[in-house]
Amino acid sequence: MPTAEELISAASIRRLGEILRAVAPQESDWRTVTASSRRLGPLALGERARTVAAAILADLPGGYRPLAAVVRSALGEPELTGWMIWPVTEAVATAATASEQPADFADGLALLAALTPRLTGEFALRTFLNADLGRTLGIVREWTGDPDPAVRRLATEGTRPKLPWAKQVPGLNREPGRTVPILDLLHKDADEAVRRSVANHLNDLSRLAPELAVATAERWLKDPDGATRGLVRHAMRTLVKKGDPAALGLVGFRGERDALAVTGPEPAAREITVGDELVFTAAIRNTSAEPVVLAVDYVIHYQKANGSLAPKVFKLAKRTLAPGESVELVRRHSFRPITTRVYHPGPHALELQVNGHRFGRAGFVLHTTDRAAG
């Protein structure tokens, strides 16, 4: 994945300054924007965007309307595109929501929609949502009928409760149902990127209000098109990993706990070292008189720094078993060092999860290389 330095780079911000200088030399010399490119080094991606946005506003201190005029002029430049757009959208959102002119709020959202095909306005939309949730959602709902799929995607992506890299919108967390009407209008969208955004949005809702998310997906499945079932599967992925019975049934898994005879999971070794693999086996038999459709996962209970255990679910297999049929499973789980996880030595545990039901907790001990060597 590209780094923050590669996305909002110093070179791209210097180029942004050149574009602004070319379209509005009479408004500003844009020195602060150019200078901001030298302050980006240690900053994360969002901080980079906000730093450059502040520089834009410093170079053009007259409020929203002069800024909007300059940005609309800059839209005539094809090179105003890519990740340099993020700080521009942030500047627009900050100025529009701070304006004392009521019309500037709606105009700022219209300008955000005009900018979003150049990259996206989803992050800056959060400023509008936090300033006036109801008014923003009313305008965003109108975007669901826009001919440009980038604008329709902005309607669902920018209002996601848990949008990555974006600031939180407490109002959406308190009232997750506020965005469902937007999803209802877009879940059959002709554009795949829009539908994927809808699925990710509904997955966000499932973390806040599982029953609402399941009920919404169930309603869509009563009148599906060719893409609806795939969208629902993607949207229910968090609830499926958690073993939510309603979500599992919605995406086609069936088979209750008393219909299954499960052996294992059985680790091949009860002590392993960081860098090794945990190898384990398990077997499942359908003891019922009906076929079962199984989502088979496994759970690693990782040791935390304070000595407690924290579970993490991993996908293992999907299987359909006829009455009396069995399946044997083998998995190798790596404990090689990775940047996203810190391994703590000590007792860990392993479980199998089948259609949300846990089976056969087995303990094992993880050693660091130094401890194992000693």
Image (spheres, rainbow, N blue to C red):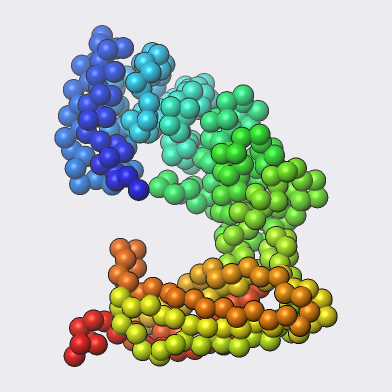
* Count of numbered circles in the view: 0
The residue sitting at the right extreme is 289
Q: Is residue 38 visible?
A: yes
Quarter location, residue 52: top left
Q: Is residue 58 left or right of residue 326?
A: left
Q: Nearer the viewer, residue 335 or 204?
A: 335
Quarter location, residue 186: top right
Q: Is residue 3 left or right of residue 120?
A: left
Q: Is residue 53 left or right of residue 284?
A: left
Q: Which residue does the image show at 35% across and 48% down from the upper left?
A: 1
Residue 59 pos. (x, y %): 25, 22
Q: Which residue does the image show at 31% across and 12% down from the upper left?
A: 23
Q: Nearer the viewer, residue 234 or 320?
A: 320
Q: Is residue 315 left or right of residue 11?
A: right
Quarter location, residue 207: bottom right
Q: State which quarter of the image contains the C terminus.
A: bottom left
Residue 290 pos. (x, y %): 82, 76
Q: Is residue 50 visible?
A: no
Up-down relation of residue 122 to residue 70 (above or below): below
Q: Which residue does the image show at 44% across and 49% down from the upper left?
A: 164
Up-down relation of residue 136 to residue 273 (above or below): above
Q: Which residue does the image show at 52% across and 24% down from the upper left?
A: 110
Residue 16 pos. (x, y %): 28, 24
Residue 47 pos. (x, y %): 29, 43
Q: Nearer the viewer, residue 28 or 82?
A: 82
